[in-house]
Amino acid sequence: MQLLLLRHADAVSSAPTDDLRSLSEKGRLQAKRVARFCKERELQPDLILTSPFLRAEETARIVAQELKSELVLSAFLASGMMPSAAIEELRAYLRFECVLLVGHEPDLSALAGTLLGAGNTGAIRMRKATLAGLFVESLTPGGAQLEFLIPAKLMERE
């Protein structure tokens, strides 16, 4: 399975609650840049799973619309996700060749670190709108290989 991890794009700093923070204009542009990058490189997820927090959902919707991928809100991706819980949840999606997760920090870095065998050491850091690609041989600690880790600012067209 190819597992793509995308940290939500830039969000406004204030909202009634943290889960209601929406994307900023910069964030919308970042999400569009990620979508275009994926499309141009034929990174086509069979399914996009997103945190229900507004900024992640908006990021995921922009990408899903461009890539014409199915989008599913997934409570396990809400801020505070533990790698072990994510790995367990992902077992239900092994039938897909490529799955994109849209979520938060430090959750996605911890998941990537665990799958790569580095644990939750902080060895990986995903800035806003960073896309990571992992080849997952098995959904176990150390069961994946890092294919790429690219921040949105490096996805700009020349």
Image (tube, rainbow, N blue to C red):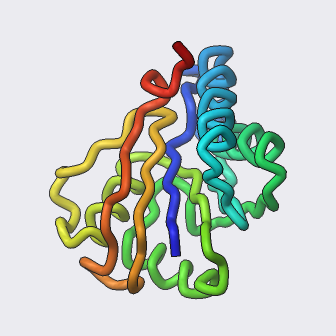
Q: How many marks?
A: 0
Q: Residue at x 76, y 63 (%)?
A: 72
Q: Quadrant of residue 52?
A: bottom right
Q: Residue at x 48, y 84 (%)?
A: 88
Viewer-nearest residue: 79 or 58: 58
Q: Residue at x 53, y 20 (%)?
A: 156
Residue 111, given in percent of the width and then of the height, sits at 37, 64
Residue 128, given in percent of the width and then of the height, sits at 46, 33
Residue 40, given in percent of the width and then of the height, sits at 65, 38
Q: Is residue 118 left or right of residue 35?
A: left
Residue 106, given in percent of the width and then of the height, sits at 35, 49
Q: Is residue 134 left or right of residue 53?
A: left
Viewer-nearest residue: 26 or 39: 39
Q: Is residue 132 left or right of residue 156?
A: left
Q: Is residue 26 left or right of residue 108?
A: right
Q: Residue at x 45, y 78 (%)?
A: 87
> Is residue 56 depicted above or below 47 in this figure?
above
